[in-house]
C-alpha cells in the first residue's frame, strides 16, 4: 500500500482528517500532521520526514486558499517528482478552491461535488 502525505489547511482540519481516516481504513500508511507531530517534536523535522517517506502527496485545495506550509510541501514534492523521484502529487478539491496553475494539467478529485466518487477516484490513483 501507498505512503500518503496529506497537505491541508488548518481551516479544513475536519475534512482532511476524515479523508486521512478513510485512506488509512483502506490500508494506506498516512502522514497527517496531528497524528505524526507530538508535543516537543520539531515540526519542520517531522514534516521533512513525512515528505521524504511519501510516495504520494495529496494536496487538499481549500475554499480558504493556500497556505505557506502547503506551498512548501507541494512545491518541494513537485520538484522531487520532476527530478525523477518516485513521488506523485494528487490534487483534491476538499472544501473549494482550485489547484495551483502549474498543476492545471492534473485532474483533481472533487470532494465538494461528490465525496464518495472522489474517494473512489483517489483510491484508484493510489494503486
Image (cartoon, helix red, strand yellow):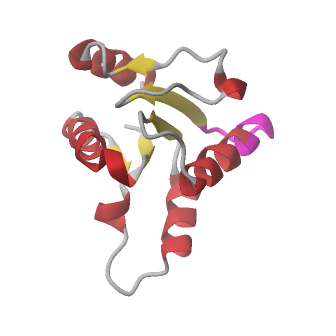
Q: Residue at x 58, y 64 (%)?
A: 48
Nearer to us in this view, 115 or 66: 66
Q: Is residue 83 magenta?
A: yes
| Figure check: 3 above or below 89 | below
Q: Which residues are magenta?
A: 79-87
Q: Residue at x 36, y 15 (%)?
A: 121
Quadrant of the rendering where the N terminus is positioned: top left
Q: Quadrant of residue 100?
A: top right
Quadrant of the rendering where the C terminus is positioned: top left
- Residue 41 in percent (x, y) is at 42, 82
| Figure check: 18 above or below 118 | below
| Figure check: 73 above or below 48 | above
Tell me: 9 left or right of 102.
left
- Number of dots carrying numbers: 0
Q: Residue at x 60, y 18 (%)?
A: 106
Q: Is residue 101 magenta?
A: no
- Residue 85 in percent (x, y) is at 71, 42
Q: Residue at x 72, y 45 (%)?
A: 80
In the image, farthest residue toward the right: 83
- Residue 107 in percent (x, y) is at 54, 14
Amino acid at each position: 500500500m501507498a505512503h500518503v502525505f496529506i497537505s491541508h489547511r488548518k481551516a479544513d482540519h475536519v475534512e482532511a482528517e476524515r479523508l486521512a481516516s478513510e485512506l488509512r481504513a483502506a490500508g494506506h500508511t498516512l502522514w497527517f500532521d496531528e497524528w505524526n507531530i507530538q508535543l516537543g517534536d520539531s515540526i519542520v523535522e517531522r514534516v521533512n520526514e513525512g515528505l521524504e517517506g511519501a510516495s504520494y502527496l495529496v494536496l487538499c485545495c481549500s475554499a480558504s486558499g493556500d497556505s505557506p506550509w502547503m506551498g512548501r510541501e507541494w512545491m518541494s514534492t513537485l520538484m522531487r517528482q520532476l527530478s525523477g523521484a518516485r513521488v506523485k502529487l494528487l490534487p483534491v478539491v476538499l472544501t473549494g478552491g482550485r489547484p495551483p496553475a502549474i498543476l492545471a494539467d492534473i485532474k483533481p478529485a472533487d470532494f465538494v461535488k461528490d465525496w464518495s466518487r472522489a474517494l473512489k477516484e483517489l483510491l484508484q490513483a493510489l494503486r
